[in-house]
Each structure stands twice: as C-alpha cells, then as structure tokens.
C-alpha cells in the first residue's frame, strides 16, 4: 500500500489549513495595525507588503522551473502527478494569497502615501499588472498540465522564467529611484 506522504489528499488539506490560518493571522495582524493609527501602522503595512511581494515573486520565479521539470516527465506518470500537485499547491497556497495581499496592501500604500500620484507609481502599477498577467498565465498552465496537456516547450518556459525577473527589476528601480 502506497503512503500518502506529502502528495496525498490529507497532506493537501493540511497544507490548505495551515495556509488559511497563516492568512487569517496575517490579515488579522494587518487589521490591528489600522487600529493603532495611520502613522504607526504605515511602516508595518509596508513591511507586510514587502513580505507578500517576496512570497509572490518566489512563486513566480519557481513555477516555470516546475513546468520545465514537468515537461521531462511522461504524461500520466507518478512523476507527472507529483509535479501537478506541486504546481497546484504552489499556486493555491502561496501565489494566489501572496498576490492578493500584495495588491491589497500595495494599493493602500499607494493611496495613503502618494494619493496615487506620480509617474513612477503609475509605471510601477503597470508593471505589477504585467506580473499579474504572468501569474494568471501560469495559473492556466497549471490547469493544463493537470489535464495532461503539456503546453509549450521547455525552452518557452525557460524564457518565461525571465519575464517576472525583468518586471521585478523594473519595479524595484521605479520604487527606489523614482525616475519620473
């Protein structure tokens, strides 16, 4: 009899429960910050935003690597099933919540600190929209791989691995340098 290990449905439920608890704690903590006052909360919210962005970027940078490895697995094999589970959990447990928190906190910070003003901020938001488009493209690919549809080629996924990196570099430069 095969052990469920880290790939069984029980492990998936546990991972979702842990992620849900972490999300509730994270959102609860953010809510408490609103109660302590705007000035004191701002730096905490900025820190939480950076944590969410780092988590989201980790997923955006790792997912194409999983797709490349998945391409090497025979369709319907145990290895392909393992990659499907890894991709699905990465998307649902880390990437979706991190993206949502990045947007929620980022929009609040843009409004509270800058009133949505500044060319650099508009360019940054456009780049984040680009990251979001990449995120949803990856999400569609996860579903295709689960159905046994090997979309694109390993070379394509190697190139796609660079898209979030380029957008991240642009965002960091825009936030730190504020060139316009």
Image (tube, grey):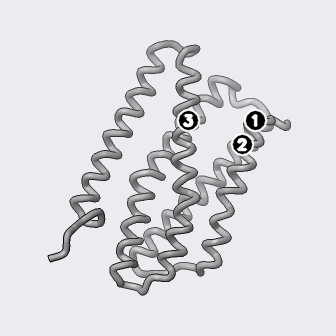
Label 1, secondary structure: give it. helix
**Residue 176's disc number:** 1
Q: Earlier in the sequence, mark 1 or mark 3?
A: 3
Mark earlier in primary sequence (2, 3): 3
Q: Observer-nearest residue: 125 or 13?
A: 13
> Label 1 crowding class (10 Å Cα cut-off): few <14, some 14-19, many 20+?
few
Cα separation, mark 1 vs mark 2, equals: 6 Å
Residue 53's spot in the image, x, y percent?
57, 43
Q: Is residue 173 above or below residue 113?
A: below
The residue at 77%/42% (across/down) is: 173
Q: How many marks?
A: 3
Q: Are marks 1 and 2 in contact (CB under 8 Å)?
A: yes
Give coordinates of residue 20: x percent, y percent: 33, 43
**Residue picked out by circle 2:** 172
Residue sitting at x 52%, y 41%: 52
Any mark on residue 139, and which? Answer: none
Q: Position of residue 45 (x, y in %)?
A: 54, 27
Instruction: Note whether 177 is above or below 80 in the view shown.
Output: above
Q: CA distance from mark 2 to mark 3?
A: 13 Å
> 81 or 144, which lies in front?
81
Q: Residues within 10 Å of mark 2 (few under 14, many from 20)?
A: few
Using the numbered discs, state the Cα–Cα distance from disc 1 to disc 3 in whole angstroms: 15 Å
* Residue 2 placement: quadrant: bottom left
Task: Label 2, secondary structure: give it.
Answer: helix
- Residue at screen point 70% across, 26% down: 114
10 Å crowding of disc 3: few (<14), some (14-19), many (20+): many
Q: Quadrant of the N terminus?
A: bottom left
Q: Residue furthest bottom?
A: 74
Q: Quadrant of residue 123?
A: top right
Report the disc number at residue 49: 3
């Amino acid at each position: 009899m095969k052990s469920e290990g880290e790939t069984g449905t029980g492990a998936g439920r546990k991972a979702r429960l842990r992620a849900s608890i972490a999300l509730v704690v994270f959102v609860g903590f953010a809510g408490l910050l609103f109660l302590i006052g705007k000035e004191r909360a701002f730096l905490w919210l900025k820190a939480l935003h950076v944590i969410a962005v780092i988590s989201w970027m980790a997923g955006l940078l790792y997912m194409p690597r999983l797709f490349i490895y998945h391409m090497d697995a025979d369709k319907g094999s145990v290895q392909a099933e393992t990659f499907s589970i890894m991709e699905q959990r990465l998307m649902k447990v880390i990437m979706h919540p991190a993206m949502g928190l990045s947007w929620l906190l980022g929009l609040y910070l843009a409004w509270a600190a800058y009133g949505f003003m500044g060319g650099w901020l508009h360019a940054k938001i456009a780049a984040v929209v680009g990251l979001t488009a990449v995120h949803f493209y990856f999400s569609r690919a996860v579903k295709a791989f689960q159905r046994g549809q090997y979309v694109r080629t390993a070379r394509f996924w190697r190139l796609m691995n660079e898209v979030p990196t380029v957008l991240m570099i642009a965002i960091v430069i825009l936030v730190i340098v504020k060139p316009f």
